[in-house]
Image (cartoon, rainbow, N blue to C red):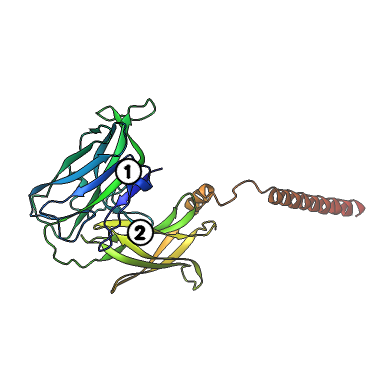
Amino acid sequence: MVFAIAMVLFIMQPKVGLAEESGLDFYVTPVFSDHQVEGSLSYFDLNMPAGESDMLQLTIQNASSEPIQVQVTPHTAYTNVHGVVEYGKDAEEPDTKLTYALDTLIETSEVITLAGNETKEIEVPIHMPEASFEGFLAGGLRIAEVKEEAEDEVKDVEGVAINNEFAYVIGVVVSNSRDSIQPDLELLDVFADQLNYRNVISATIQNYTPTFVNRLAVDATIQKVGDTEILYAASAEQMQMAPNSHFRFPISLEGDRFQSGDYLLTLNATSGEEEWSWEQTFTIEADEARGLNRQDVTIDSSLNWWMVGSIILFTLLMLLSVYLLIKNRQEKQVKE
């Protein structure tokens, strides 16, 4: 499991994590260039012309008396299933509306060795796209300790393996201009799904604009088509979406089994004064429902012996009834 200490952007409310709270053996401090937007102090917030390059500078201090190795890797921001922007990981499925992925514009550093209590200044090059773009590109620098190659670990070209237990993540946001962009959302899909091996109905919400969606609130309900009863509902507030990203908003079945049939999703979303509403029907097939129900850890899929016994007893009684009926007719025929 990855435990990241985040120094990332939450738009107007940046949060800073401290190394001593995590047990990390090093400290990281960003050093800002002339392209840094005034007022942004805990993350890189650069406004640069198209085609221009700059250096993301970091001061890394080894807080231990033993030598350590660290490496800086770039990542493109995405929105996770909880409606939280991730800056230090890669999305499993990059959004189709993402024109430029920030991690492709920033170079990965070599492995950096620091002697005990040593401090180093390092530079990570960033190159803006040749063509100008609107809005923001967002991501982060993940600074993680590396260790010598172990037999059970996958090594990189340097012969070292990244220790994923703890890391710093420093947010990076770049733009060509600070012109205001109005956020806009779309409902891409709704389908039967699972989250942590528990049945949910997922609604895929897409932010197809190159700007952050802040203070996002979502309310969703599920009904059978043609029925007014609300079967399942979910709501969440204070979420945020990265520019040009999507996430699956989960509506829990609260331990229920999936039932095949046609359903209706009603979903309302708000961000500040912006509002969106959608209604979309979807179908859960019988085979799909059975497969997901078998995988749900909250559903007891073991054999129900009471039910088996009841079926066997019912079958025996039916056979006995048929036998007695046939025997009774035969006796009547003999008497006649």
Residue 85 lies, in percent from the top left, at: 31, 55
Given residues 81 and 266, the one toward you in this image is 81
Residue 134 lies, in percent from the top left, at: 14, 60
Residue ID at (22%, 53%): 43
Given residues 197 and 77, the one toward you in this image is 77
Q: Is residue 182 visible?
A: yes
Q: Is residue 285 visible?
A: no
Q: Secondary structure at mark 2?
A: loop
Residue ID at (54%, 57%): 255
* In contact (CB < 8 Å): disc 1 and disc 2: no
Closer mark to the observer between disc 1 and disc 2: 1
Given residues 207 and 259, the one toward you in this image is 207
The amino acid beneath tag 1 is: Ala
The residue that mark 1 highlights is 167
Q: Secondary structure at mark 1?
A: strand
Q: Would residue 199 be found to the left or right of residue 245 on screen?
A: right
- Count of all numbered marks drawn on residues in the image: 2
Vertical arrangement, residue 141 with respect to residue 244, above or below: above
Residue 154 lies, in percent from the top left, at: 33, 30
The image quadrant that residue 146 belongs to is top left
Residue 218 lies, in percent from the top left, at: 38, 67
Task: Calculate the distance from the C-alpha at mark 1 to the C-alpha at mark 2.
Answer: 22 Å
